[in-house]
Amino acid sequence: MTLAEKILAAHSGKDKVSPGEFIDVRVDLVMANDITAPIAIREFERLEAKGVFDPQRVVMVVDHTVPAKDIPAAEQAKLVREFSRQHGLLYLDGGKFGIEHVVLPEQGLVLPGDVVVGADSHTCTYGALGAFATGMGSTDIACAMATGEIWMKVPPTIKLLYHGKLRKWVTAKDLILYTIGDIGVDGALYAAMEFSGEAIDALSMDGRFTIANMAIEAGAKAGIFRVDNKTMAYVKPRAQRPYKVYEPGEDARYARVIEYDVSQIEPQVAFPFLPSNTRPISQVGEVRIDQVVIGSCTNGRIEDLRLAAQVLKGRRVHPEVRCLIIPGSQEVYLEALRQGLIEVFIEAGATVTMPTCGPCGGFHLGVLAAGERCIATTNRNFVGRMGSPQSEVYLANPAIAAASAILGRIGGPEEVS
């Protein structure tokens, strides 16, 4: 079996599972946020369940509109807060913790071999830890909260092998953008993407989280990595419960195997209005911008902020550009302070905010007006994603985003060095 199949078999009480098979799966963790939890809570109450299956296995995170931007947002957060208190759930507020997909791994709540379901499509981020993690609708999450189980169809697995060594300024974000550009936004539809190869082994955990995060942008059910020494170095200081590491079988059957030579990949930019609409930085042309967003659950970790600061240090943001820096968690924010990165950003003329999903989904703190363009380290650039349907969002890595903030147009770090 593949890595995904082994985890699902273990959680369904079966010796073996095969793609296309319908199974009942025991879950290790259930998550919802301030946007999706209220729907799940209402459906949970309709079930008339006595309580959640395990309060220590259900996590509520308020992170999308924090601090609350208006009365409806405040009411949403209040509902989540009160439900969490009533049932004794794990409750993580953005002001104390941060963005869900950065915080849950940081806090040791997701571990290798887990099955994790979340009412957020980017729950697949946790696959970087060797977990099977997937997003689900709020109604399914309500049932998972009540029973500790879900039903699902076993996905086929696509194996992606990345060979060679990355060029300067090419990051994990570029690998996943390049991949999505190659196979398309439905290229891994309802499949598990298993990432491997020497270029993947060389990536930090921060980089692996970035790739797993965007598996959903290829239509995948999950994105998953094998556990290695880097994974264990990340997990061991954080884990507070037992876990089991799974390995794909040597005779595992894959629906498809795709190979890439990463030494041939340039930094990528995804043009509107799909993450698959990618171009290498050398072919971007003249694209003026109004705003830059560096952060999110995709690229808001300390490695990302260090890369942005490396480009911005001693330079100034273009006078016609707004540059927003959003640490992925308070832990990342504090580390950025200790390393002097926040000072670099402020001296460059950028705005640093608390951890929030706000701009990424067009909720607050960076909403775009009609005709405005933004280059962001986020994961989606659909029509109206950050505000007006007449605005445009371009996706890139933190170095490209930072260089663009200086230039006032999309460009690479070599142009400002």
Image: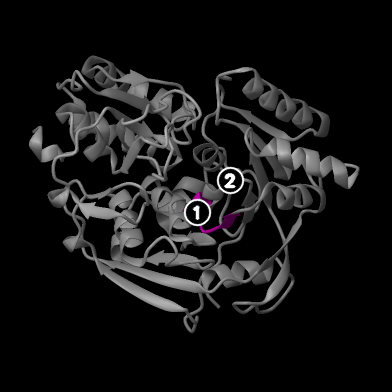
* In this view, 178 is above or below 78: below
Q: Callout 1, which amino acid?
A: Leu
Total numbered badges shown on the rendered structure: 2
Q: Position of residue 192 (x, y in %)?
A: 51, 66
Does the segment drawn in magenta span residue 45?
no
- In this view, the residue in front, 410 or 158, is 410
Q: Viewed as shown, does residue 39 lie left or right of 301?
A: right
Q: Position of residue 70 (x, y in %)?
A: 59, 18
Whether residue 392 is visible to the viewer of this picture, yes or no, is yes
Q: Position of residue 321 (x, y in %)?
A: 24, 23
Residue at left 55%, top 41%?
238
Which residue position is annotated with label 1? 129
Q: CA distance from mark 1 to mark 2?
A: 18 Å
In which image quadrant can residue 328 be found? top left
**Tag of residue 305:** none
Residue at left 81%, top 43%?
44
Q: Which segment is the magenta one?
A: 125-134
**Tag of residue 120:** 2
- Mark 2 closeness class: few <14, some 14–19, many ≥20 residues within 10 Å: many
* In this view, 270 is above or below 404: below
